[in-house]
Amino acid sequence: MGHTMAEAVLASASNTERVSPGDHVVCEVDVVMTQDIHTPGIAYTLEEMGVDELHDPSQVVVVLDHEAPSHGVTNATEKAGIREFVRDHPGVTFYDVGTGISHEVLSEKGHIRPGELVVGSDSHTVTHGAFGAASTGLGDTDIAYALATGENWFRVPETIAFDIEGTFGEHVSSKDLLLYIAGEYGTDVARYRAVEFRGPGVEALPLDDRITLTNMSIELGAKFGFTPVDDVVIDYVTDRTDEPFDPIYADDDAEYAETYEIDVTDLEPQVAVPHDVANVHPISAVDPVEVDQVFLGSCTNGKYEDLRVAAEILDGHEVAPMTRLLVTPASREIYGRAERDGLVRIFNDAGAVVTNATCGACPGLGMGVLGEGEVCLAAQNRNFKGRMGHDDSEIYLSSPATAAATAITGRITDPREV
């Protein structure tokens, strides 16, 4: 019996000829990422462990992205401590405030390569499976251990597959597909499992749209998420790194715990209503709720294609009165490209607020915090109670297209009607 993607990478990383679901393996990691929310705790754990030197600083990437820039003295002081930590460990790669969200920055800067094992101090580290890397988030103690030893242990997960057929309709995207999966199969369908999104419906997607699938695989409970490694991926990676890499693929005779077949031809835009990512309905079944804020951004939907789709809908329109639109590119590189291509002008002319590249509004760390009773439609990944601000606010999740249409009307709107 052959290996799935996750099994193949874990076998390679553990120098093991054959692994099976349920096995426990000790693996060499290729990249360790920490961000500003967790780096102080990780540094403290290393100190408690008596670790003065990192195993391999060249494999470590530190990104300041969550509360960036700082909104208070306490956080600013923490960031000063992180910069001191970086100075104390020469060889660590450091991206300061404004570079972008870690999950976008790592691939842009050539740190992510097919076939490698990546760990990070953030649950959305699963994003990098779009590039054929087995990538996952770990807690502070496990990240500290990886920094100290270059290794970590894993239980080999089962793998499930979503075979996607058909062609996406106008203003229907991979975000709608992921929300549909969450609503149809639940947010536990992939709990401590790996997910492979396969089939012609996925292969036809731009890379940015595939990233949305792997990024939100964590919302299905996944340990790892993968999309196909093809020429699109190989070309992207080789343009951004001189490091050699060896892509790993699933074997034809790999065994999957479950396989789901989905035809997206008739899929309509989807909306997750408060306060659960799995509380999903087709937009035709969602009330046209008036919104106070629309947010387009995050590691899920702040990519260039997300901005382009939204700008095409917004072009020539204005944001509705009493509704605010926040647009946050996922990286400085994306911001620059959007500016050169006129997207930023479209957002600005429509009345949107375009921010620097940061997590910001998504986890309620500034630049869009919701007040009591406010309603937000967000093209991001989570709509947990209180995530973006007040516990009595409400978050609806949608695609960038639905977000743009909603910003124009001031109420939840099907983008196919604008």
Image: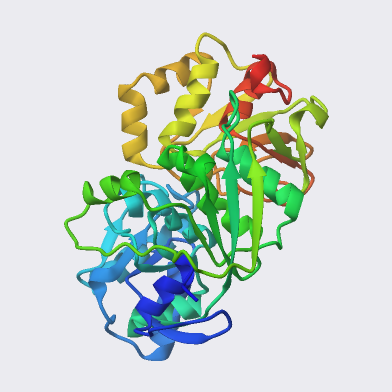
Q: Residue at x 58, y 41 (%)?
A: 165
Q: Position of residue 155 (x, y in %)?
A: 54, 81
Q: Is residue 274 above or below residue 193?
A: above
Total numbered labels placed on residues in the image: 0
Q: Quadrant of the C terminus?
A: top right
372 on left or right of 181: right
114 on left or right of 103: left
262 on left or right of 343: right
Give the image's coloring scheme. rainbow
Q: Position of residue 76 (x, y in %)?
A: 43, 56
Extreme-bottom residue of the structure: 50
Residue 404 can be seen, yes or no = yes
User: Splitting the image into 4 quarters, where does residue 341 fall?
Assistant: top left
Question: In terms of depth relative to the viewer, which is nearer, 160 or 272?
Answer: 160
Q: Residue at x 43, y 61 (%)?
A: 35
Extreme-left residue of the structure: 242
236 on left or right of 198: left
Question: In terms of depth relative to the viewer, which is nearer, 61 or 300?
Answer: 300
Q: Position of residue 107 (x, y in %)?
A: 34, 52
Q: Residue at x 32, y 62 (%)?
A: 247
Residue 276 can be seen, yes or no = no
Q: Position of residue 86 (x, y in %)?
A: 28, 67
User: Splitting the image into 4 quarters, where does residue 243 fall?
Assistant: bottom left
Q: Is residue 107 above or below residue 271?
A: below
